[in-house]
Image: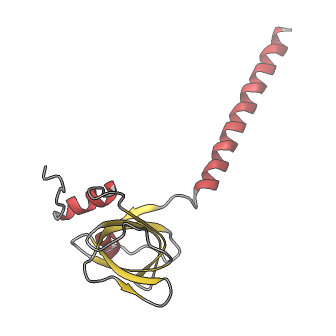
């Protein structure tokens, strides 16, 4: 009787381990398209990503670069002080989107132009995404809006 209990316990533990491995694999497979790596313009200039890779680009919208096309087409440049990337976006920009402000866009790099599918902007006068602040600090061009 004791041997049967021990055998049953081992089978339950083995089945639970297999289920855990299978669940982890399925979660990883489902999330692979949902993970977008952040890149600054300088990183893109050094090592351009593959045209099929979706990633996030962040930096400051370069002053004087915002050009509105026909309909909802918009182009502008994003910089981190070290490099500049041209961005193309079709859609309605967030209300707080403007030149010399931080932004993050999600999209793909095609023929040297970042084609954005989503644009995010700051939510108040001092906010800037942490990734953008870190990239600007690395370039030595970050200025703290609070003066500290």
Determine the image quadrant of residue 58: bottom left
Image position of 44 (left or right of 64): right
Image position of 21 (left or right of 74): right
Image position of 71 (left or right of 130): right
Residue at horizontal 25%, vertical 71%? 100
Number of marks drawn: 0
Q: Nearer the viewer, residue 47 or 118?
A: 118
Report the quarter where the N terminus lies: top right
Q: Nearer the viewer, residue 8 or 79?
A: 79
Q: Nearer the viewer, residue 148 or 142?
A: 148
The image shows residue 35 at horizontal and vertical percentages of 52, 58
The image shows residue 60 at horizontal and vertical percentages of 28, 69
The image shows residue 46 at horizontal and vertical percentages of 31, 73
The image shows residue 130 at horizontal and vertical percentages of 32, 54
Q: Nearer the viewer, residue 121 or 23?
A: 121
Image position of 109 (left or right of 52): left
Residue at horizontal 80%, vertical 20%? 7
Residue at horizontal 72%, vertical 37%? 19
Question: Which residue occupies the extreme bottom position in the image?
Answer: 70
């Amino acid at each position: 009787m004791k041997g049967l209990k021990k055998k049953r316990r081992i089978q339950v533990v083995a089945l639970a381990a297999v289920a855990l491995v299978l669940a982890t694999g399925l979660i990883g497979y489902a999330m692979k398209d949902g993970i977008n790596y952040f890149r600054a313009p300088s990183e893109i200039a050094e090592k351009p990503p593959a045209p099929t890779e979706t990633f996030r680009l962040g930096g400051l919208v370069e002053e004087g670069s915002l050009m509105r096309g026909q309909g909802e087409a918009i182009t502008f440049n994003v910089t981190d002080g070290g490099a500049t990337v041209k961005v193309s976006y079709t859609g309605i920009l967030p209300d707080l989107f403007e030149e010399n402000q931080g932004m993050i866009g999600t999209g793909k790099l095609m023929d040297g132009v970042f084609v954005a599918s989503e644009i995010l902007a700051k939510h108040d006068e001092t906010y800037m995404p942490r990734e953008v602040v870190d990239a600007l600090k690395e370039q030595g061009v970050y200025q703290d809006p609070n003066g500290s």
